[in-house]
């Protein structure tokens, strides 16, 4: 499911895809999200939004392949109102590094 929302920064449009539903805050302080069945697994490091507000960043995917969960480092304070909320990820990852930058190795010259 793909939806468009207006971002906080002005009149820019962000294309969002449904990630899933927030289940709870874990004891370690992370948000646990049940990933939607129709969604391909997202990448770690992707930002997570509710409507237009950025609420966190995906740290890791846990659980089985058939029913995955996302562990998210929150940018918000824990509260009970967040459980059950639908969360989205951006289709364009602005933090993605190019292949050249990823494969670059700094070598010392002698």
Image (cartoon, grey):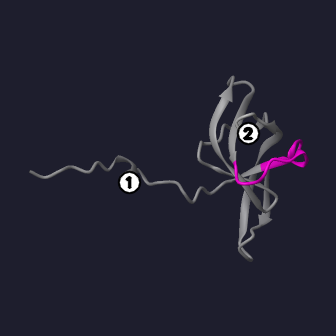
Query: Which residue is the site of mark 1?
Result: 101
Q: Position of residue 10 (x, y in %)?
A: 73, 77
Pick out the residue farthest to the left: 110
Q: Which mark is residue 39?
A: 2
* Side (left or right) of 32 relative to 62: right
Residue 64: x, y in percent? Answer: 69, 22
* Within-10-Å neighbours for mark 1: few <14, some 14–19, many 20+: few
Point out residue 28 in the picture as x, y percentages from the top left corner.
70, 36
- Does dot 1 land on a helix, a strand or a loop? helix
Q: Which residues are magenta?
A: 74-87
Residue 86 magenta:
yes
Residue name at image x 89 percent, y 45 percent = 80
Left or right position of 94 against 80:
left
Q: Which quadrant of the view contains residue 39?
A: top right
Q: Which residue does the image show at 39% across and 49% down from the upper left?
A: 102
* Quarter of image, res 20: top right
Residue 102 as seen in the image, left or right of residue 105: right
Element marked by disc 2: loop
Residue 13 placement (x, y as % from top left): 73, 68
Q: How many marks?
A: 2
How many neighbours does mark 2 have within 10 angstroms: few (below 14), some (14-19), or many (20 or more)? few
Marks 1 and 2: in contact by CB < 8 Å?
A: no
Q: Is residue 76 above or below residue 19?
A: below
Residue lying at 60% horizontally and 42% vertically, measured from the top left:
43
Q: Is residue 18 magenta?
A: no
Q: Nearer the viewer, mark 2 or mark 1?
A: 1
The residue positioned 29% from the left and 48% from the top of the image is: 105
Q: Nearer the viewer, residue 41 or 30?
A: 30
Tag on residue 54?
none
Tell me how far mark 2 sits from mark 1, CA to CA: 28 Å
Which of pointers 2 and 1 lies earlier in the amino acid sequence?
2
């Amino acid at each position: 499911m793909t939806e468009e929302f207006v971002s906080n920064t002005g009149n820019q449009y962000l294309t969002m895809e449904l990630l899933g539903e927030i289940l709870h805050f874990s004891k370690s302080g992370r948000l646990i999200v049940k990933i939607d069945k129709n969604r391909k697994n997202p990448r770690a490091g992707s930002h997570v939004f509710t409507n237009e507000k950025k609420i966190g960043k995906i740290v890791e995917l846990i659980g089985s392949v058939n029913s995955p969960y996302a562990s998210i480092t929150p940018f918000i304070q824990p509260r009970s109102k967040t459980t059950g909320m639908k969360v989205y990820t951006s289709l364009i990852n602005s933090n993605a590094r190019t292949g050249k930058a990823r494969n670059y190795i700094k070598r010392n010259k002698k």
